[in-house]
Amino acid sequence: MDLFFPMLALGLVTSLHCVSMCGPMVVTYALKGTEDGTTWQRVAPNLAYQAAKIVSYMAVGLALGLVGSAFDLAAIRPYVLVAAGLFMIVLALGMTGRVPWANKLTPRPPKFLLRALTSVRHRAVSDAEAERPSLATPVSFGLLTGLMPCAPLMAAQLNAAASGSALDGALAMFAFGLGTAPLMLGFGTASSLIPRRFKERAIIALALVVLVFGVTYLNRGAVLLGSPVTLQAARDAVFGGEASAGTYTLAADGYAEVPIVIENTRFVPATLDLPADTPVRLIVERRESNPCSDQLAVPQLGVLADLADNGTTTVELPAAPAGSYTLTCGMGMMSGRLVLSDGTDAAGNAATISATTTGDGSLPCACCNGATSAETIEKSAAIEGDVQRITVDTSKGYYDPNVIRLAAGIPAEITFTRASGCLAQVESPDLGFSEDLTSSAVTIRIDAARLTPGTYGFNCGMQMVFGTIIVE
């Protein structure tokens, strides 16, 4: 479904091109002999042509999607996307009519198609002379339309092939055909009303649409190949990249472990600062089931891993030298980065790295970033009317704040953000609450009677991460 609306939009814009290029042929071949008929006699062949054309588009999309699925491999798919992107760019340049060499590269109709079109034309003329127009003629022409070497149609077909799925390819071409139908249904009137100058401008606009598709596919291929030259790299060069983030811990087996969230088809954080020459274990919490994010890829390291829907998946990366590495999805649509630094440059994580053991010599909790040794973060609840409220952020692998100050005798609402791993449950034996945080944020209400002056503790379900509530 991800291609449906973009392809529908491409079809709507393309219909202007169809009126100019295919309109006269449809009038000549498909609708011959219906000019003086009743309204239904004039409309029925047009509907038959459009339906047959869409069926033809879907059949081609099904076949191309099936072929494209064979290239859904990490080593080959990026090159398919690059080739598709370059071809779309050449098609767009040829459509403008101002780049002769690009126009020469646009394929011409094969001889078998020209023979078939000639046969349809002869049949249309014969039926018209015999005053027995048949729906077989517009249906035949509609079925042949899907094989036309038309630039916008080929751009749509490339999208279908790049979808990597027979079903998605057919659906994409259905959307494209549906988009071309409204204007083509009234193409006779439209052709006479649209000025030539406007048609020329519309073709230029259409060429720009195809060019955008081409650049998009070229960029996706470049991302999957780990190329340093991508649209994201250009954006970062102009506007500056996102600051490195992500606190990691060194596990007992020598892996640097770091949590990362995928939500709204985005990596959070998008840039991870990690140690060089150290194997990495990404704890990936995917909070969606969008097919765009069902795989995680690090092209330069040859990593392509399937991710669980609305769940947590562990992805291991081999040790790699210092440098910047692409982090993306299996389709090259998501943008992220791994920045691997040597020990000197990774000072930002020094506190966490050095904390490979706690004060009593035990190992810290790897899945919550060694938060047993996190610094004190203290905040007071805000009193709003007859209740005091505060939010505790768990996304960093520890409680922020981990020291909460409340006023005695006033009901309190403490909201803990959604969490996973050892932070998936929060409890306080002192205050009598225990809540699961894996599905969503949870607001815990504490009655005024419980909030007498004193110090109360709360912790994660594994008793690895702790916090304090001070009531005054």
Image (cartoon, rainbow, N blue to C red):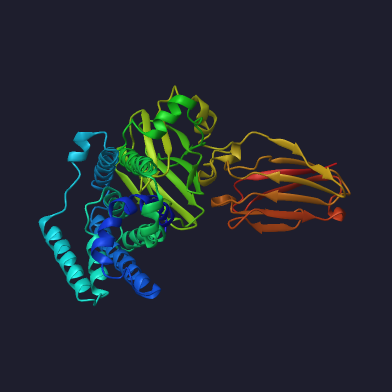
Q: Residue at x 33, y 59 (%)?
A: 173
Q: Is residue 278 visible?
A: no
Q: Is residue 332 visible?
A: yes
**Residue 435 coordinates in the image, percent (x, y):** 66, 58
Question: Looking at the image, which is closer to me, 90 or 112?
Answer: 112
**Residue 10 coordinates in the image, percent (x, y):** 38, 51
Q: Is residue 378 left or right of residue 172?
A: right
Quarter in which the N terminus is drawn: bottom left
Q: Residue at x 32, y 68 (%)?
A: 35
Q: Is residue 151 left or right of residue 216?
A: left
Quarter in which the C terminus is drawn: top right
Q: Quadrant of residue 368?
A: top right
Residue that extends furthest to the top in the rendered view of this protein: 344
**Whether residue 223 is situated above or below residue 164 in the rendered picture:** above
**Residue 405 coordinates in the image, percent (x, y):** 79, 40
**Residue 192 coordinates in the image, percent (x, y):** 37, 53
Q: Residue at x 41, y 51 (%)?
A: 193
Q: Quadrant of residue 307?
A: bottom left
**Whether residue 193 is situated above or below residue 121 in the rendered picture:** above
